[in-house]
Amino acid sequence: MIDFTVIQQAFSGIFAQAITFIPRLLTTIIILLIGWFISRFLSTLIKRIAERVGLDGILQRTGISGFLDRAQIESSGGDVLALIVFWTIFLNFLLIGLEYLGLQAAVDPLRNVIGFLPRLISALVMLVLGALVAQFLGRTASAAMASMGVEFHQQVGQIVNSLILIMVVIVILQQLGLDASIMINIVTAVIVLTVAGFALAFGFGGQNVARNVLAGYYAREYFDLGDTVLINGEEGTLEGIGTLNAEIQMADKVLIVPNVRLTEEVTVKKL
């Protein structure tokens, strides 16, 4: 015979638990609604501030926008920043709600995610600032090489920019708690091999290259393009001063001379 007393007690226990749980659930829903409104308000505020300061323009100049385009991320920089702010705040309210409900199994993983977000935000800030610094130093190096007449000055600027960006990425990976030792070893090996290559090149004739580069720098201080010059008793017009050589238009030919000869043997014809 069925013992209805046991069934009645079971349903009574379930009903009592439901009665106790419903107020907690309603409180959690209210917490989440408040969290959603606060997160929405602050993320919208951050987006407007980003638009005011021209965040998209900064990302465009640093090349980060191009990276986002290649990753098929069509949102603007302000939208991405607002999304990060929204979830950073809302997940904290979600954590409070889950703790209030006593769902500890979901609380611990969520707490780990929330603990990672500040490091992610700081990494993004470091990436933007590092890209700006890399761009500035790359342009500075390029301008310095251009002032010395180095024809590959743009490539020098790009190399400086890339090296600094790589170092920034390594720092960011370490900030995120990731192992960057492999990348550090690769970058170190590339730098060592590059320096060794330049040292060997300098040892096997690179001195003449360096002399011509420096001579070109001083020649630009002394000569002007279009000057009428004398070389070996012949008259010509100075057409250009390159990284290593100068171009002189003679009466019947174009004469290419090393910059060292330009500074040592060529004189400007006095009118």
Image (cartoon, rainbow, N blue to C red):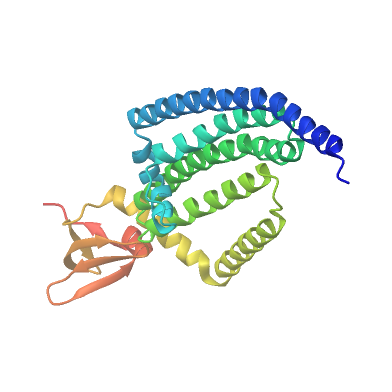
Please give left or right for residue 110 compared with residue 261 in the image: right
Q: Residue lying furthest front in this view?
A: 1
Residue at x-position 20% and y-position 73%: 254
In this view of the protein, can residue 136 be seen by the observer?
A: yes
Residue at x-position 34% and y-position 40%: 57
Residue 211, picture quadrant: bottom left
Nearest to the observer: residue 156 or residue 147 = 156
Nearest to the observer: residue 197 or residue 171 = 171
Nearest to the observer: residue 211 or residue 101 = 101
Residue at x-position 72% and y-position 36%: 107
Residue 248: x and y in percent read: 22, 67
In this view of the protein, can residue 100 be seen by the observer?
A: no
Residue 203: x and y in percent read: 59, 68
Please give left or right for residue 123 compared with residue 265 in the image: right
Please give left or right for residue 148 compared with residue 251 in the image: right
Residue 154, picture quadrant: bottom left
Residue 214: x and y in percent read: 42, 55
Residue 241: x and y in percent read: 28, 60
Please give left or right for residue 61 compared with residue 198 in the image: left
Nearest to the observer: residue 110 or residue 214 = 110
